[in-house]
Structures are given as C-alpha cells and as structure tokens.
Image (spheres, grey):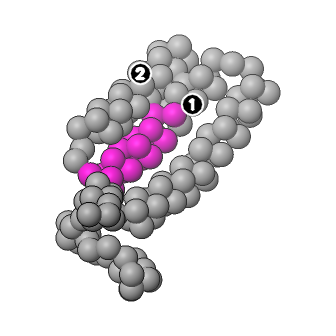
Amino acid sequence: MTDVFSAALLLLGSLACLLGALGLVRLPDVPARLQAATKPQTLGLLLILMGTALRVPLDSAVTLLLVGLFQVITAPVISQLVGRSAYRSGSVRRARLVVDELADKMPADTTPADKGPADRMQEERPS
C-alpha cells in the first residue's frame, strides 16, 4: 500500500513540475512566468519529496523535510526579487498590471511603462 501511495505522490509531483515548465514556455510575460516558475514547481518538489520520504529510512526522510522547508522559504523570496528586478529594468509592461504597488516607490527618472530594454537601448544610442 505504501508503494502505491508513494508512486502516486511521485507521479503527481512530476506532473506538477511538468505543468510548471510548460507554463514557463507558454505564458506571455514575466509576472505570469514567475507564477509558473514558483508555485507548481514548489508543489511538485514537495510531492516528490513526500513520495520519496515514504520509501527511505527515517533519518533520510528528515533530511528531505529540511529540503522541502528550505524550498518553501526561499522560492517566494527569490520570485519577488526576480519580479522586482524585471519591473525596474522595464521588462514588465506596467500598462498590463492590475495593481502597481511599485509605481509610487520608483524614482522619477524611470522610463515609460510601455518601453522595454531594447527600446531604451535604441534611444540611448548617439545619432
């Protein structure tokens, strides 16, 4: 019975990781890709770790628990940092955002919302 439950968790975890990877490829913009990179990947890893923990001795299962805890703690922080960096570099189209909490916190000399890094590079070239 444990083998069946472990196999089911492993398959569900790998399916969640696969769906996250497809979301990274298919979704159109940075905020959507960040969601696909963090939420399904974290869920998939946790399911895989739980399925593996059922098959290994207890001391190894505790190590897997620590790996899962580290992933749950670090994934949202890294996602936020990548999203903020993308926002500041102009990779995020601000017109498409429903809520823009960083607009008031950005310096006044930032570039317009609809221009990306390639547009800014073209403007900065000397004529």
Q: Secondary structure at mark 1?
A: helix
| Relative to 10, residue 112 above or below | below
Question: Residue, x 59% and y 22% (percent of image)?
Answer: 52
Read off the magenta span. Answer: 29-45
Crowdedness near tag 2: few (<14), some (14–19) or many (≥20) residues, C-alpha within 10 Å = some
Q: Residue at x 32, y 73 (%)?
A: 111
In the visual, does 56 lie left or right of 92? Answer: right
Question: In which quarter of the view is residue 77 placed?
Answer: bottom right
Residue 106 lies in the magenta stretch: no
Q: Is residue 41 magenta?
A: yes
- Residue 50, label in figure: 1
Q: Position of residue 121 (x, y in %)?
A: 32, 58
The quadrant of the picture occupied by the C terminus is bottom left
Tell which of 19 and 10 is nearer to you: 19
Q: Earlier in the sequence, mark 2 or mark 1?
A: 2
SS majority, magenta: helix
Label at residue 27 = none
Nearest to the observer: residue 60 or residue 103: 103
Q: Can you give x and y, in whole percent of width and height, for residue 2 in the image? A: 55, 18
Which residue extends farthest front? 127
**Badge 1 amino acid:** Met
Residue 92, horizontal then vertical, whole percent: 31, 61
Amino acid carrying label 2: it is Leu
> Which image quadrant for residue 59?
top right
Whether residue 61 is visible, yes or no, is yes
